[in-house]
Amino acid sequence: MCLPWLEEDAPYIDPGKPVGQWRADECKDFLRRQRLPLGGKVKELRERVSENRDMPIPPAVGGPLEDVERLILLHWAMNCHIMGMDDGTMEEILVMKQLIMLFLSAFSKFEKSTRPFTDRTKPLWVTKYNFMCILNIPEQVALLGPVRNRWEGSLRGEGFLKLVKPMVNGQRKNWQKNLLTNVCRQKTLLQLERDETYEGFEDNDDDDDVDTQMYRCYQSLQLMRDFLEGRPVSCILQQGGEQQQDLSVYCVYKRGSTKFVTKFIVLPETRKYHFGLWYFQIREAEAEADNGEDEDDIMEVEFSEIDVGDYGILVPLVENGPPGLGDGETPIMYSLVTSRWRTFNDTGDRAINPYQYLPN
């Protein structure tokens, strides 16, 4: 089973004592089974239980666990393939169509098991336009190329509406042309104002050609704390790493006014496959002494010396409960997902896209 934290609902067990002695969690277990509100203090919950103690038990809501797992896995596979396409070939488009149909079929089957207990009269995938719109993606890719090349975040997408809405004054003749003209004027004025504001200031060479919103600059202690507690960690990748099959990533931190990076090395022999991703143990790279041997000091490089090629997130492996060091201090395992939807393959190299490494 790929999702070990998903479990069948445990059967309800009566506490076997007067309702006046029930704890809040025991009351909520009963009310949840009866599909009754769970809000309120313990006294209110006990009163609600007493009022409905003799009510018949309604049938269970939802489908089997296998349907839930299948829905999640197909949703993941569909997204990975859509965002991982490089060329938008007919073969890739055909696979995308099949994955979309499989996902919608799985969702329809799952939704049928919950709809009878709601007020909905139509299937959810019909009333929610997002489900209908994904059917148009294959045709869009055939016409315009991979979806990843048409990212629609921030001002590149719907965020642009926040900028132009105040400028719309009705839809009279030529309103589109007038709107775009006003947008250009506003952008020109803002640019002129910015140039005057920063005139005489030197640029920070550390961030030339680097999108500072694509990575997090940690305080040094916070970076190590996130690693020890098994939290997702922001990282950058060096230019040319994919061609060199580089097995390392860099994390940025700040000490004083200077940015540094710590190099982390992937250990290929520790690989583990879980939920469609390869996970590895990683360790800090050690600085090399003049004689070529490793020193005990951690390798530390100024951020300005790194040629940034991509950005990513190190995702911790969560198997049973929250991540963290166990009793035996087992190292936490991480996978990588970059801003271009690339991840590790089974040897720790960065792959083209994670979908092609799904096991049969």
Image (tube, rainbow, N blue to C red):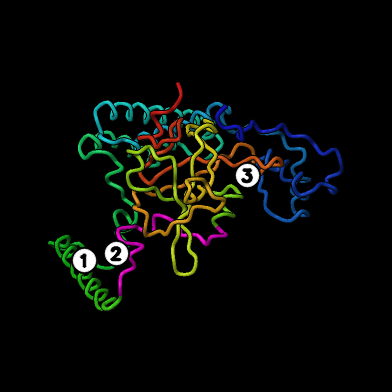
Q: Are marks 1 and 3 in contact (CB under 8 Å)?
A: no
Q: Residues within 10 Å of mark 2 (few under 14, many from 20)?
A: few
Residue projecting furthest to the top: 360
The answer to whether residue 98 is above or below residue 308 is above
Q: Residues within 10 Å of mark 1 (few under 14, many from 20)?
A: some
Of circles 2 and 3, the one toward us is 3
Q: Are marks 2 and 1 in contact (CB under 8 Å)?
A: yes
Q: Which mark is residue 163?
A: 2
Q: Which residue is mark 1?
A: 183
Q: Residues within 10 Å of mark 3 (few under 14, many from 20)?
A: few
- Residue closer to the observer: 227 or 13: 227
* Extent of the magenta region: 202-222
Which of the marked residues, 1 or 3, is nearer the chain's N terminus?
1
Which of the marked residues, 2 or 3, is nearer the chain's N terminus?
2
In space, the residues marked 2 and 3 are separated at their CA atoms by: 40 Å
Q: Residue at x 19, y 64 (%)?
A: 179
Residue type, label 2: Leu
* Residue 181 position within the rendered picture, expressed as x and y whole percent measured from the top left: 16, 66
Q: Which mark is residue 322?
A: 3
* Residue 281 position within the rendered picture, expressed as x and y whole percent measured from the top left: 55, 39
Q: Residue at x 74, y 48 (%)?
A: 48
